[in-house]
Structure formats: C-alpha cells, structure tokens
Image (cartoon, grey):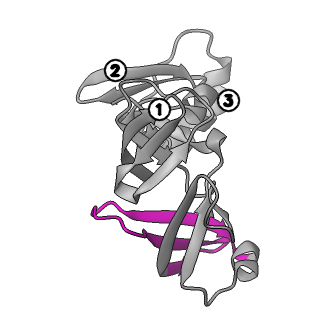
Amino acid sequence: MSGVLEKFKGTTLFVSHNRDEVYRLCDRIAVLSDGKIEVISEKRALFENPKTLAATLLTGCKNISKAQKLSDYTLKALDWNTVLTTEQKISDDLKYVGVRAHYFIPHENQNEDNIIRGKITHVTEDPFSMIVTVQCEGAQSTHSSIRWELSKKSYEEFEENRKSVFLKILPKDILMMSS
C-alpha cells in the first residue's frame, strides 16, 4: 500500500482508525472528533504533543487524568491525586494530562517531584512486555488506575512480588490537553 501512495503524485485522503497504519502511511494527520476536524498536524508532532483528548487517545495514550493548573509549570492530575511539574508552560485552558504507559520510571524515593504512588493490582504478560496496573494512592476517581508497560527484563529487575510502587514521570513526558 505505501508503495502505491509514494508513486502517486496527487493528494490522497486516507481514512483509518488504526494508529499504526496512519503513522506508517501518512505525513500529515487530521483528527476528527464529533464530526469536526479538531487537529491537523505533521505525524511526529501529533504523536509528541497531541494537544486534545481525541488526538491523545488516537495516538495510543492509555493514561489520562482530568487536570487543574496550579501555576505556570505545576498541575494536579486530579484522577491520580498527584501534583506534577512540567517542562512546558501550562496554558490556562488545561483540561487533561496524559502519560504514555512506557514513560513511567520505577523509583525508590517517594519524596521527589513527579512521583505517582500506588499499589499494583494486576500484572499481565504480553509476548515481549509486561503490563502492570497500578491503583493510585489516595485517588477517589474511577479513572485512578495507571497502565505501566515495561520489558520483561525490566519487570524482573523491578521485583516481581512488590505490592507498592513509586513511578516517576519526567517533566518532558507529560502530555497536556486543552479539550
């Protein structure tokens, strides 16, 4: 399919619900939500900074929380009961925050910035990775679980029988959404 598209000299409109297919075949992506174009972006820019809830979901982000701006570089992830410091300045119209499942870093020090504290509630083995569900400490929301994905080797090094976990999020890895 990509060979045909590369040889064609005209404009092509490609419609798909498969993010991997869209990433492989398209240079620019338009995200539709409720029948309207919400975002038009170069593909790499869209995946690095989706900007809206619909775009973030389309790019495969599994961890999204309602958010509240606390200062120019600090927000509260309401569903995760966690305060996060960001690399980018936070806009006044912030509504959601997201973190990709493979961006979490296991950490020992719970007193640092950008740490989500929680309990492991479920572990699923995939062919090449482990998916760990973490219930955020002190969270009251039904969306208070985190999906953490890591390699099998990293999971073994992490200690399989651990029940509590501290997950660090780098400020550059925080996705902020306005709608």
Q: Are marks 3 and 2 in contact (CB under 8 Å)?
A: no
Q: Is residue 61 visible?
A: no
Q: Which mark is residue 99?
A: none
* Residues shaded magenta: 123-152
**Sequence-wise, which precedes: disc 2 or disc 1?**
2
In this rendering, which labeled residue sits more in front, label 3 or label 1?
A: 1
In this rendering, which labeled residue sits more in front, label 3 or label 2?
A: 2
**In what element is the residue under mark 3?**
helix
Q: Kindly identify the residue that appears in the image at 67 percent across and 19 percent down.
A: 7
**Sequence-wise, which precedes: disc 3 or disc 1?**
3
Query: Which residue occupies the foreground of this view, 68 or 64?
Result: 68
Point out residue 129 in the picture as x, y percentages from the top left corner. 65, 71
Point out residue 8 in the picture as x, y percentages from the top left corner. 62, 16
Q: Kindly identify the residue that appears in the image at 63 percent across and 34 percent down.
A: 87
Point out residue 111 in the picture as x, y percentages from the top left corner. 62, 63
Please give the residue where the numbered disc 1 appears in the rendered image.
Answer: 71
Residue 127 appears left or right of 68: right
Under mark 2, the amino acid is Ile
